[in-house]
Amino acid sequence: MTKKFNSIERCDCNVIHDDIVNQVRDKMPHEESLYDLAELFKVFGDSTRIRILWALHEAEMYVCDIAVLLNMTQSAISHQLRVLKQANLVKSRKEGKVVYYSLVDDHVREIFDQGLIHINEK
């Protein structure tokens, strides 16, 4: 016998803890904010970008120095830096013809630090 499922399965049970459900619902961020958060975490989902963030976590750096450090082309690093800038994780400053990159603020450093703390817990 085959069961038919709705296109979106939903829980058929009754709410047991209305107070908890309402409390959480009241505190839940808007859908757009949660979407933006998911997009931010996607940026952290690339190991090259993580390596660049680690380098910038330690020091402000020039794109060519990052390329040498990570044994990658300047073009590949520039592409990833562009993604990181669009996500507001990295900023740049120009000194003559040289562009230096750094983390945009301490929040990025904290996200990175907390992630490392979490994966090293055992």
Image: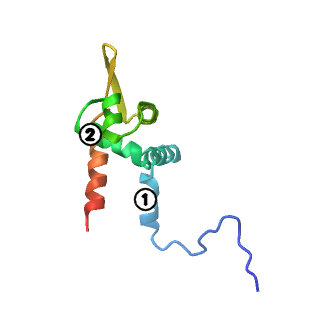
Quadrant in the picture for the C terminus? bottom left
Q: Nearer the viewer, mark 1 or mark 2?
A: 2
Q: Residue at x 52, y 43 (%)?
A: 32
- Residue 107 in sight here: no
Q: Residue 4, position in %: x, y?
A: 74, 75
Single out the residue that lies furthest toward the left.
58
Asked if residue 11 lies left or right of residue 69, the reply is right
Q: Check the image and report above or below for 48 versus 23.
A: above
Quadrant in the picture for the N terminus? bottom right
Residue 96: which quarter of the image?
Answer: top left
Residue 3: which quarter of the image?
Answer: bottom right
For numbered disc 1, what is the local secondary structure?
helix
- 62 or 93, which is in the foreground? 62
Q: Residue at x 42, y 65 (%)?
A: 20
Q: Residue at x 43, y 65 (%)?
A: 19
**The residue under label 2 is which amino acid type?**
His
Q: Residue 26, position in %: x, y?
A: 44, 53
Asked if residue 45 lies left or right of residue 61, the reply is right
Q: Check the image and report above or below for 119 versus 36.
A: below
Q: Residues within 10 Å of mark 2 (few under 14, many from 20)?
A: some
**The residue under label 1 is which amino acid type?**
Val
Which numbered marker is on residue 83?
none
Q: Residue 77, position in %: x, y?
A: 41, 34
Q: Residue 49, position in %: x, y?
A: 40, 42
Which numbered marker is on residue 24?
1
Q: Which residue is mark 2?
A: 57
Single out the residue that lies furthest toward the bottom.
1
